[in-house]
Amino acid sequence: MVEFVNNPHSENMVRYGRERENTLVLSGDLTGSTEIAEFKKQLPEKFVSMGMAEQNMLSWAGGLAREGYVPFLHTFAVFLYRRPYDQLSMSVAYPNLKVRLVGFLPGIMTPGGVTHQAIEDISVVKSIPNMTIFETGDATDVETVLDATDDIDGPIYIRMLRGRLPRLFPKNEPFKFNTARILNEGDDITVLSSGICTEEAMKAVELLKEKGVHVKHLHISTLKPFTDERVVKALHESKNGVITLENHSTIGGLGSAVADVIAENGITTKLTKIGIPDKYAHGASAEYLMRKFGLDALGLLNTMEKALDKKFNITEEQVKTFDLKVEQEEIKDTQLEAL
Amino acid sequence: MEQIAHGIRQRVLELTIEKNGCYLSQALSSAEIVSVLYGGLMKLGESQAPFVAPSFGGVPGNSNKDYVTGAAYNGPTGPGYDRLLISPAHYAVVIYAALVESGRLSPDSLKEFNVDGSIVEQIGAEHSPGFELTTGSFGQAISQAGGIAHARKMRNEKGRVFLFMSDGELEEGQTWEGIQAAAHYKLDNLVVYVDVNGQQYDGWTKDVMNIEPINSRIEAFGGTCVTVDGHHIDELVRASQTPTENKPLFVLCYTNSAQGLPELDYRKPNLHFVRFRDHEIEQFKAILEDMKKGVR
């Protein structure tokens, strides 16, 4: 059974801000929707309302960062890079300032339609020098990603999740910079997934175990830099190619990053990219859009059948009713003593 | 201050002849504004930068930890000091000339203007002498100045933040977002001097995209606004003392883009970048000699 956690970012932002003197939270008039209402209530002196004026917010944050503050900008992902692109580039990224862009509703997670769907954010932000890009995939990632920003002396873009989130990764294994989580071992085929697609990939991997298919599955949470040796090794080891699964355009995201690594390391393998095809989405539920674009477990299984030239006969109904059994974290003796 | 202004005009005219083109009209319109800022109006400390401009040392980034901004030429940035931020990076040559005139930069450094590998760039970035921000894309400096002024206010730090702007930038939407936010956070430690020369690249501002009435627009956005003759030193200085309780202060400096060089009047309003025609060069060389002798 998967454990669920309600609004982990809300509590974590308060904890993080309380522990660090120079933290500021900037809101682009989406305080409730970006889970910082609690921060505003508990740490009002560190909360800065910037209204609906994102270009100003990006440059203002640059000014604050030059004075030693570390601003965490909260709004929907699209409003952090699409509207204020020039400001992000010239007021924040060029001077390499410690500004943290906390972008909500990455990819197709909102029925708000194209204006609210950040489908090309990784592609755009990745090509800006000095940027680091993180993406969260579960409650543990969300609870620990802020701590992972401490040592990064430059701007960071974070694809953040909100609401009720599954805990897919052990609570005591925090988000680690430029380090993939190895979720399953196998050498039939390698799957690299990110964000909300990892839960889907985990389901597909479990279902395939019964069919005797052994998948090497990695969860990617740092999109830039993309130099993790675990990734290079996993790409080398696969017998039947590599599949990437991401909640982003197939151009310029995880799939493209993997393609670069394959080419640059001279790895001979076939890559299949699953993501949002080169087109805009529209206003509909995440579940519907993930099905439409094949970003879910069934979509991955269908792609696997082609890649392995096999039929699994797993029905949509079977996938729907399948419940992921996430292993309970081990409670270490030392922790028990601490209790 | 008048001497600095005269020196700015003379040095930029000289560069315009030597380099076969320069941002001359910007110097003619803003010479007095910049000269009061560097000439004692602001509380600036001693320059922290090399007197002779070093060559370009790379862009900011984690592989360049020794990076320093051109703000070092304006003195220390700590509590108690005023800060000078430059919004229109196309005025870079005016800032360099003012640094030379106020003894912060060697006269020879000006010869590095627009030379490959030099930090004395044509359109300055934050490594250029006198610059703290990268503002070649217009409208971003007011928001960055707002963030700096806001940070200093939160820390109750003494010293004001002066921003030098041009009037064309008032066409950018971000400018108004910035004024709105500076008013919202009651940034009375922010002072903005605007060179209103009424011209932009395409022609007269009133024809390209009208921005008047600037005064009432700024006041409507929550700022205090005063209007001065931008070539009148006393007015420019006095304006900085305008009472402005809880509001950012804007000083609109109405200027003439050919001030001190009426020989250029005939080109108005096309003075964004001045390159002398062949038959004019001797005429302007003679004017330069007169300026050097102090007879004009």
Image (cartoon, coloured by chain):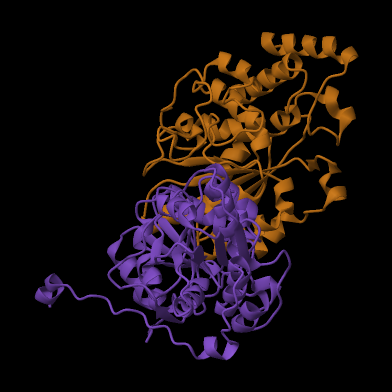
Q: Residue at the spot x=34%, y=61% of the render?
A: A147
Residue A23, image quadrant: bottom left
- Give the percent coordinates (x, y) of residue A114: 70, 72
- Give the percent coordinates (x, y) of residue B64: 44, 34
Relative to A80, residue B191 above or below:
above
Which one of the lettered chains is coloured purple? A
Relative to B80, residue B184 above or below:
below
Of residues B40 and A232, the one drawn nearer to the viewer in this rendering: A232
Q: Residue at the spot x=56%, y=79% of the render?
A: A312
- Give the percent coordinates (x, y) of residue A96: 48, 45
- Give the percent coordinates (x, y) of residue A206: 44, 78
Of residues A11 and A270, the one drawn nearer to the viewer in this rendering: A270
Chain B drawn colour: orange
Q: Residue at the spot x=41%, y=59% of the render?
A: A180
Residue B78, image quadrant: top left
Q: Quadrant of the N terminus of chain B?
A: top right
Of residues A308 and A332, the one drawn nearer to the viewer in this rendering: A308
In the rendered image, is residue A333 in sight?
yes
Count of numbered circles on the image: 0
Q: Is residue B238 left or right of residue A331?
A: right
